[in-house]
Image (cartoon, helix red, strand yellow):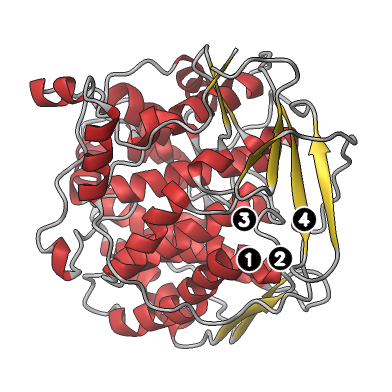
Amino acid sequence: MLKASGAAAGIAAVGAAAPAAAAGAGTGAFAHPGLLHTRTDLDRMAAKVKAGAAPYTAGFARLTANRHAQSGWQARPQAVVYRGSGTPENYSLLYNDIHAAYQNALRYHVTGESAYADTAVAVLNAWSATLTAVNGSADRFLAAGLYGYQFANAAELVRDHGDFELSRFQEMLAKNFGAVSDDFLVRHNGAVVSNYWTNWDLANMACVLATGIFCDDRAQVTRAVDYFKHGAGLGSIRNAIPVVYDDGLGEWLEAGRDQGHALLGVGLMGTFCEMAWNQGIDLYGYDDSRFLKGAQYVAKWNLGGQVPFTANTRRKGAIGGWSGSETVTAAAGVDPSMIRPIWAMIANHYTKRRGMSATYVTRIAAKAAPEGGGGDYGPNSGGYDQLGFGTLAFTRDRVSPSPAASGAASASASASGAASASASAPVPGASPSAMGKGDDLAATGSGDVVGWAAATGVTALAGGLLLLRRRGRRAG
C-alpha cells in the first residue's frame, strides 16, 4: 500500500533538535567552521584518534594512506576547467586538487601538524589565483555543482589560516561555481524542468548552499533550502522521493535509472542536510524524516533486498524545442559489492543524534566501514563525487533525547511547518546570472544512455512533468 506521497511539510524533531542557528545569522553571518564539519566535530576527531579509539583510528588510517593526503602535494591550476563531450576535458586536475586540499586540511585538524594546513592553503590559493571559468557541455553544471561544494568544504577547514586568501577564494567560488549552480536551478540549461535527473539538481543545490554559507550570503542559503523543500526539479525532496510506502520505505526516483546515480543522489542529499544542520536548519527531519525513508530504501535495495516500485514517466527535452518522455517500471539491478562513502554520516545522524531506528542504513554503513575518500574508489570521476572519510568524521556518541525534543516529535503537522519556517526565514534572493545555453541538453548526464520501457502514467507531480503510475495500488 502507498502512503500519501505529498505529506504535509515540516520538521519532525525525533530524538534531537537541530543545533541553534549561528549567532548573528539574521544579519548574514554563519557559524564557521560550519559546512560538513563544525569545531566540535574536528575536536572530537582529534581527541578520539589521539586516544586510540575505534573506529576513528581505522578511519584515520584510510586518510593517511591516501596519496592525496600527503603534505607537499603540488597543485595544477587551470584558467578554464572543461567537462563534457566536445571539449578538451581537464576537470580531473580540479577534482584531484580539491581532494588533496580537503584531505590535507582534515589531516591537519586531526594531527595539528602545520605542513598539512600549509599544503591545503597552497592548493586553494593557486586555484583562486588562476581559475576564470568552468565550461564544457551540459556537464559543466555537474562540474560546478560537485566541485563547488567540495571546494567550499576544503576551504572552510583553513579559512582562518594566515596565508589563505579568503576574499579572493570567496570571489572565485561565487563567480565560477555558485552562480553557475544557481542558474541551473532556475533555468535547467533551457530544458523542461524534469529533463535532468535528481543528482543534477542535488549537486547544484549542494553547491549553492555551501557557497552561501562559506561566503556568508544568507539569501543564497535561503534559496537553496527553499529549493530542497519546494523546488520544481527532480532534486527537491518530494520529487526525489515521490512515494512513501506503508513499511516506511521511500522510493528513490533514480532507483529506476541505475545504482551508481542513486547512490550519488543519496550522498548528495545527505551532504545537503548535514551542511544545513550545522547552521541550525533541520532538513534531515523535514516532512516526517522523508530523507531517512529514501535512504533506507536505497540501502535495502543495495544490500540485495526486494523493494517496492511505482512506475513513473519523466518528460525531457528543451523548452520550445524537441521533447520526449521516458518511463521506468522497476528498480534497476544492483551489484551488492558497489560501495560508496556516503553512509556513516546518515547512519550517525539518525541513530546517534536522534536515537531513531535505521536498520538498512546502519547495516550498509557497517559494510562500507572504514570509509575512505577520493582516490579510494577508482580513478574516474565517480570515485571523487563524495569527500568521504565518514568513519573518522561522522562517528559520534549517542545523544540522549531531551524532553523538549521528545515532545516535539508528537507535534501536529501545522506546528512542524511553523518550526520549519522559523528555521530559515525567507530573504529576497539576488537574481542568478545567465549561463545555460539550452543548446547542449543532456537527458541522462555524462553521455550515459538508459533504455526505458514504454508506459503511461496517471498521477502528476512537479507541474505535470513527473508521472506516477499506481499499478492498482490504493493511495492512502
Say which amino acid is labelled 4. Lys
Q: Secondary structure at mark 2?
A: loop
Residue under numbered circle 2: 191
Classify residue 50 as left or right of residue 222: left
Residue 31 placed where, x, y %? 19, 59
Q: Earlier in the sequence, mark 1 or mark 3?
A: 1
Asked whether the residues under the numbered discs 1 and 2 touch, taking CB atoms below 8 Å apart as contact, a structural biologist would say yes
User: Relative to residue 110, is residue 299 depicted above or below?
Assistant: above
Q: Is residue 170 above or below residue 60?
A: below
Marks 1, 3: nearer the viewer = 1
Query: Which residue occupies the foreground of this view, 362 or 433?
Result: 433
Residue on which the image places disc 4: 316
Query: Between marks 4 and 3, how big is the CA–CA gap?
Result: 14 Å
> Which mark is first along the chain, 4 or 2?
2
To which residue does mark 1 refer? 188
Number of the label disc, if any, that sits on residue 200: 3
